[in-house]
Image (cartoon, rainbow, N blue to C red):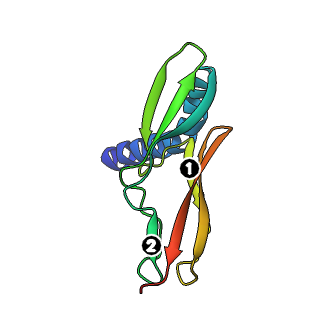
Amino acid sequence: MKRIIIIALIALIISSLVFILPYVLVPVLSGRDIIRIEIGEFPNNIAYYVGESDSVDLTGGTVLIHTRGGTVSERRMDIETVTFSVVYDVDFSVPGVYEVYIIWIDYVVRFPVQVIERE
């Protein structure tokens, strides 16, 4: 019985951290006085053939985070974190140019991706 209670307590603590951690991290990150973000490196692939993909591949892409104190941090685009997200609405069945948005706290950068017909 003691073992079940201990396991239940550990599970409760771990599940609590999942809900509490984002609220702890956001003030720390926003307290750095971020002044802007920018694209460091574009992803390796920003052009796609119609029908060959169903998601944007962010591998190789980075975002640079500039702070008021002059510090610049580099973050990979392909790893989403609590305060970093990727938003796009690319229709991979229709040729065209689409925007991908990278959001870090209240800052947004974007870059285009293109869906093209195979010749």
For disc 2, the neighbor class at 10 Å (few under 14, some 14 to 19, many from 20) is many
| Cβ atoms at labels 2 and 1 below 8 Å apart | no
Corner quadrant of residue 74:
top left
Give the residue displayed 56% in from the left and 12% down from the top: 69
Mark nearer the N terminus (2 vs 1): 2
- Name the quarter where the C terminus is drawn: bottom left
Q: Residue at x 60, y 68 (%)?
A: 97
Which of 82 and 73 lies nearest the eye of the viewer? 73
x 61%, y 35%: residue? 23
Q: CA distance from mark 2 to mark 1?
A: 21 Å
Q: Amino acid at mark 2?
A: Tyr
Q: Secondary structure at mark 2?
A: strand
Q: Position of residue 46 (x, y in %)?
A: 45, 62
Q: Position of residue 61 (x, y in %)?
A: 42, 48
Amino acid type indicated by mark 1: Ser
In the depicted view, which residue is nearer to us: 25 or 108?
Answer: 108
Q: Residues within 10 Å of mark 1 (few under 14, many from 20)?
A: some
Residue at the far right in the pictured view: 106
The residue that disc 2 covers is 48
User: Residue farthest to the front?
Assistant: 119
Q: Residue at x 47, y 76 (%)?
A: 54
Whether residue 90 is visible to the viewer of this picture, yes or no, is no
Name the disc covering residue 55, or none: none
Whether residue 43 can be seen here: yes
Q: Please state the horizontal and vertical placement of residue 59, each as a whole percent of the image.
A: 37, 55
Q: Which mark is residue 85?
A: 1
